[in-house]
Amino acid sequence: MTTEIQVPEAGAEMRLDRFLRREVPGLTQGVLQKLLRTGKIRRNGTRAEANDRLALGDVLSLPEIAPPTDAPKPRHIVKMDENRTKELERMVIYQDDSVIVLNKPAGLPVQGGSGIAVHVDGMLDALQGEHPERPKLVHRLDRDTSGVLVIARSGKVAAKLSAAFRGRDVEKTYWALLVGLPDALEGRIDLPLKRIDLGQTSRAEPASRKDKEAQKAITDYRILDKAGRKFCLAELSPHTGRMHQLRAHCLALGTPILGDEVYGSAYHEHFANQLHLHARRLSFPHPEGGLLSIEAELPKHMVNGLNYLGFPAPDAAKPRRSGRGAV
């Protein structure tokens, strides 16, 4: 049996996953992720993505969900001992009455899931302090990607920041060590991507612009340093936020990200066997006014890689808030 839901005015501009969790009793996050991964949720007849922004009148279809037979499971909270609390506190690179900004380490998931016991979302209670609301996630980074992660102090702030991330008001800058050297040292990758289900995981693949499941994906890049044609350091600026966009685009450029075995980069003996991709800088409208720019220090494995290649590994700039409302 299939359930169809037409999006009302109140659901317009909501993320698809949040809308469905609100509207469908018994739809857990785990079930929702599985249905999306296997293409069983459709939006106007085409495969849906969790971060799709809904429009008035959209028709969503998904398998019928059995109503819950017991009370919903409580939010998974990570048990915070002294060491884990100190670890979380070290991640904080900026905070004020509206936002908290973390430098997320590589390997730490942002949200929970099957087999995930420790994740950022489950640790946020430890950052509430004297504030009346539990901090809330605003965006995500892949598990193996390190760097700038913004947390909202309240639901009101989260709504403002989510709107900024949906639009063009947020500038994202990543650093990546690439295997090889592209022919052009700077340029734009305008290559639609399509999500491919691999069972337990998913992968982004280049897609034809005529493919109904293709999603627009654009990344600007420039090479900051190079070691002949063997390795280079790239600055990547995504204009869209597709799953694994940077990893897939770098592979399409012929220069996969170092340590990314899923997207074509073999292990190299002189480097850590980790993904060398870091969310270096984020500039976004501060909820109280002005523009907040935050940089995150590079993780140790990337610093070691840069040192081995003889590339500079500059410290992160200090947080800066400018413009109207800045203090």
Image: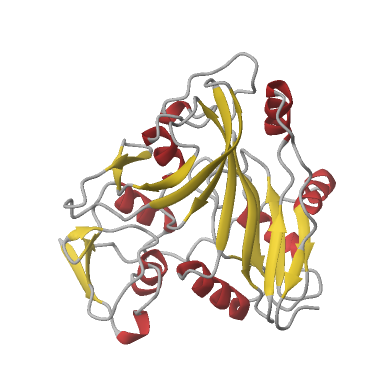
Out of 233 and 299, give the one closest to the viewer: 233
Name the residue furthest top: 269
Residue 186 image point, x, y percent: 49, 42
Residue 292 image point, x, y percent: 69, 68
Residue 1 image point, x, y percent: 15, 61
Q: Is residue 230 above or below residue 42?
A: above
Would you say residue 77 is visible in this rendering? no
Name the residue furthest front: 184
Q: Is residue 181 above or below residue 150?
A: above
Identified at 28% across, 58% down, the residue is 48
Identified at 40% across, 74% down, the residue is 14
Q: Quadrant of residue 59?
A: bottom left
Identified at 74% across, 45% down, the residue is 297
Out of 174 and 181, give the one closest to the viewer: 181
In screen coordinates, is 166 left or right of 284?
A: left
In screen coordinates, is 232 left or right of 251?
A: right
Would you say residue 183 is visible in this rendering? yes
In screen coordinates, is 130 left or right of 276?
A: right
Q: Is residue 301 above or below residue 138?
A: above
Out of 255 and 26, give the one closest to the viewer: 255
What kind of colouring is applied to the model shown? secondary structure
Residue 94 image point, x, y percent: 77, 62
Q: How many marks?
A: 0
Quadrant for the C terminus, please: bottom right
Identified at 21% across, 51% down, the residue is 209
